[in-house]
Amino acid sequence: MAIYEKDIDMLKENLIHLPKHLDGKACVLELKEANYNWRQMEWWSFYFEYKAKILLASHFSFPGNRYGRVSFDLKGSINWDLKAKAIKSDSHSIILNDKSAMEQSVEEFGYHGEIILLCDVEYNDNDRSFQQWHTELKGGKSKYEKAREARTSVSRYRKTQAELADIVILIFNATDLDLLATHRQGRNSNGKSRRPKYELDLEKIDDFEHYVIKR
């Protein structure tokens, strides 16, 4: 019996109860009430994280192990990361986590897990009404937002709704990590270069051990 099999059983049993439809304003207000990352632009990802913590509390610890400056989202028998991905985006790839941290996680436990929530998202915010509402709720723009605006006039549209389609559970061992691409990002808000991360092409998940929870 693989070390992670109980984890997978618990994920299948509990994550099926994640909400299917998310409304931006309702979710942000719920996160605010819980004082849980409600100021974040990618509210939908943090809302799923918040709900997953509640559903998985009996078997998993939050956060997972820490390697250097990187903490994984949760830990059962192995470490796990929780990601949300908009499936109608132009890219079929998803950025995972810090390469060194994932390698150390695999070295310690033999495996590392990823939980990917595939979602249909709606923006419908051409007039920036949701963005304005969220900014007012936060009490104004953050230092990060002001700094970004100083660098560029381009502002991303906010997601206003999300519909959970499938949940993909993936297991990586040391050999699997060699099959992943490397994503090199730009710089952090403090100007320092970001550490390289692993990147997964979702069209190649058949190359890895994985399980799909249909919603």
Image (tube, rainbow, N blue to C red):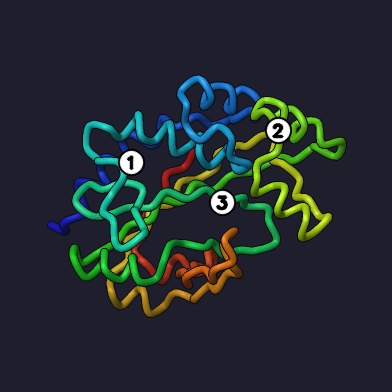
- Which residue carries the number 2 mark? 140
The residues tagged by marks 1 and 3 sit, at their Cα atoms, a distance apart of 19 Å
Point out residue 87 in the picture as x, y percentages from the top left corner: 62, 52
Point out residue 180 in the picture as x, y percentages from the top left corner: 44, 74
- Which residue carries the number 3 mark? 85
Residue appearing at x 51%, y 35% in the figure? 37
Q: Earlier in the sequence, mark 1 or mark 3?
A: 1
Residue appearing at x 56%, y 51% in the figure? 85
Q: Residues within 10 Å of mark 1 (few under 14, many from 20)?
A: some
In which quadrant of the rendered image does the N terminus lie? Answer: bottom left
The residues tagged by marks 3 and 2 sit, at their Cα atoms, a distance apart of 27 Å
Task: For marks 3 and 2, give the one nearer the viewer.
Answer: 2
Point out residue 188 in the picture as x, y percentages from the top left corner: 57, 62
Mark 3 belongs to which amino acid?
Answer: Lys
**Vertically, is 80 above or below 38?**
below
The residues tagged by marks 1 and 2 sit, at their Cα atoms, a distance apart of 40 Å
Mark 1 belongs to which amino acid?
Answer: Lys
Number of the label disc, if any, that sits on residue 173: none
Which residue is more in the foreground, 77 or 37? Answer: 37
Q: Earlier in the sequence, mark 3 or mark 2?
A: 3
- 139 relative position to 51: left or right: right
Mark 1 touches mark 2? (CB < 8 Å): no
Residue appearing at x 41%, y 71% in the figure? 207
Q: Residues within 10 Å of mark 2 (few under 14, many from 20)?
A: few
- 160 relative position to 40: left or right: right
**Image quadrant assignment for residue 14:** top left
Which residue is more in the foreground, 19 or 70? Answer: 70
Mark 2 belongs to which amino acid?
Answer: Gly
**Could you say whether the residue bearing mark 3 is in a helix, strand or loop?**
strand
- Which residue carries the number 1 mark? 12
Residue appearing at x 30%, y 35% in the figure? 56
Mark 3 touches mark 2? (CB < 8 Å): no
